[in-house]
Image: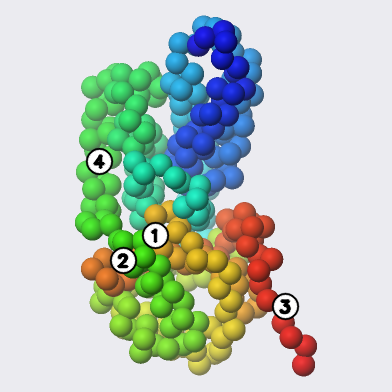
Amino acid sequence: MSNADDPTDVFEAERPRLVRLAYRMLGSLSEAEDIVQDAWLRWRKVDHASVTSPSSFLSRTVTRLCLDVMKSARARRETYFGTWLPEPVDLSFDQDPQDDLTLTLMLALERLSPLERAAFLLHDVFGVPLDEVAETIEREAAAVRQLASRARKHVQAARPRFPVDPKEGMRIAKAFFEASSTGDVAALRTLLADAVVVRSDGGGKAHAFPQPIAGIDRVIRLYQGMKRKAWIQKAQKLQDLWIDGLPGYFSLEPGGTYQTVALEIEDGLVVGVYFTRNPDKLRRLVDVFGGRAATPTAH
């Protein structure tokens, strides 16, 4: 690193990439930002003149910190109530066109070991050379190649065959909100694939379905039941979003529950619906968009 380079400027230039890396490792943006802040504190104490590649040094630091956190995170996931979904992040956070990891791919990464996940992300997604990955996770290059290969096979099935066009995706998301929030099950049926699966994450703190709901008939019956109980009336959409590469929205549901909905789309039909209702994962979106909720009119 050149003596003319300001260490703070160097780190801030790397920060967005480091947060993306940590988020992809952990599935939590808040934890990712904590990791990157920890890396900053360590960076301040380094002899910067001895660092030949700040980018490599910082990637290595963040990855190792993430691997430490993942040990406890895995234990927490085992006791997590119901379905776990990554913290929903708007596309504005993820601007790198090379990073095509969607929410569904993030879920596929959850089935990998921490080292497989690190090897795949660093090498396949962030383009880190194999020898640098080996140094980062302290394994031989041949072992890293095997880790990345195994991860690639697991993840391949989750990659979309045909990425959805953004305009078409948002059109379907808007139609889905309209149909689901008004209880129009006939319109909803036209949007869903026969093998659609609904997953919802409440974290034990908001109402959610503890197990996935699979099949169009079961999903339609679910919405018919919600309509009868008036659970889907008066929902307010607060913002259209592109959530982890999937079209969706952020809404305020009856009873004051916030949620995000992300839709996985194939061949023009919804094959996956992902509800995130855990308030711990929605604080950032509530802070940004929660003020858009309409004030109820007194009667």
Dot 2 falls on a residue whose secondary structure is strand
Residue carrying label 4: 152
Tell me which numbered mark, 3 or 2, is placed earlier along the sequence: 2
Q: Which label number is shown at residue 295?
A: 3
CA gap between label 4 and label 1 equals 21 Å
Q: How is the image coloured?
A: rainbow
**Residue, far right:** 298
Dot 3 falls on a residue whose secondary structure is loop
Compared with residue 11, is residue 105 higher up or lower down, i.e. above or below? below
- Tell me if mark 2 has few (under 14), some (14-19) or many (20+) residues whose alpha carbon lies within 10 angstroms of its own: many
What's the residue type where badge 3 is placed?
A: Thr
Image point (26%, 24%), residue name: 143
In the rendered image, residue 286, in percent from the top left (x then y), is placed at: 64, 61
Q: Nearer the viewer, residue 208 or 276?
A: 276
Dot 4 falls on a residue whose secondary structure is helix
The count of marks equals: 4
Mark 3 and mark 1 residues within 8 Å of each other at the beta carbon: no
Mark 2 and mark 1 residues within 8 Å of each other at the beta carbon: yes
What's the residue type where badge 4 is placed?
A: Arg
Image point (61%, 29%), residue name: 38
In the rendered image, residue 66, in percent from the top left (x then y), is placed at: 49, 34
Compared with residue 130, is residue 94 higher up or lower down, i.e. above or below? below
Tell me which numbered mark, 2 or 1, is placed earlier along the sequence: 1
Residue carrying label 1: 246
Tell me which numbered mark, 3 or 4, is placed earlier along the sequence: 4
Image point (22%, 56%), residue name: 161
Residue carrying label 2: 265
